[in-house]
Amino acid sequence: MGINLLTKTQKIMRNGKRATKGFSNRDMNDDTYKLRRAVMTIIYEFKNRYDIPRQIIRIVDRVHGVKSHDGWHNVIGYAGMGQNYVHIRGDWAEKSRAKLLPLVAHEICHSVKAIDHDDSCKLMSPIIVDMTEDEVWRACDKYLK
Ligand SMILES: [Zn+2]
């Protein structure tokens, strides 16, 4: 079940255009472009369903040999709490919609409404698990409507 990887949030104010410590913005190549397109497609669906501000989306990579924040080594995505930016790790995130939707939805809830992790909620659990589309939208309705 699930991707079983962590997501993290930034609680401090920072510039969403730059990757966080130990990560770098990925150069644009076909693969990155495809992943970014897939993420943007999902973001547009959120904009159609909910009243959310513009989001800064970046595809990032872990920088080999550079320390990140404690416990951040394995993160596949992170967001600024209420800061309207989402960074997805390009070398780990799967490009299939079924895997991306719960990940992006989770980060959007952090990014737009500063929703905290919640072990009792599949969507906001810090460990991303597989969810059906229906489950994702029902959980998002709870946070974003
Ligand atoms: Zn998270």
Image (cartoon, helix red, strand yellow):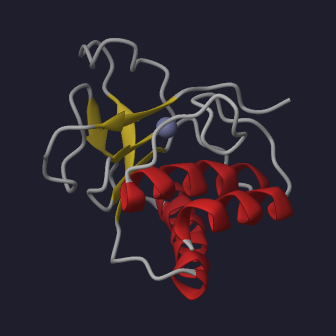
Image spot of residue 106 (x, y percent): 56, 49
Q: Give coordinates of residue 131: x percent, y percent.
A: 81, 48
Q: Position of residue 91 (x, y in %)?
A: 52, 37
Asked if residue 58 can be seen in this view, the reply is: no
Nearer to the camera, 85 or 60: 85
Q: What quarter of the picture does the N terminus occupy?
A: top right
Q: Residue at x 28, y 12 (%)?
A: 65
- Number of dots carrying numbers: 0
Residue 47 vs 128, above or below: the answer is below
Q: Against 139, is 68 above or below? A: above
| Relative to 139, 106 lies left or right | left
Is residue 17 left or right of 65 when viewed as pictured? left
Q: In which quadrant will I find the C terminus? A: bottom right
Can you tell which quarter of the image residue 78 is in? top left
Q: Is residue 139 above or below residue 130?
A: below
- Give the residue at the far bottom of this rendering: 48
| Spot occupied by residue 63 in the image (x, y as percentages of width and height) | 31, 26
Q: Is residue 73 left or right of residue 47?
A: left
Res. 92 image quadrant: top right
Q: Nearer the viewer, residue 76 or 111?
A: 111
From the viewer's side, name the closer residue of 35 and 123: 123
Residue at 25% over, 37% down: 11
**Any part of residue 13 in sight:** yes
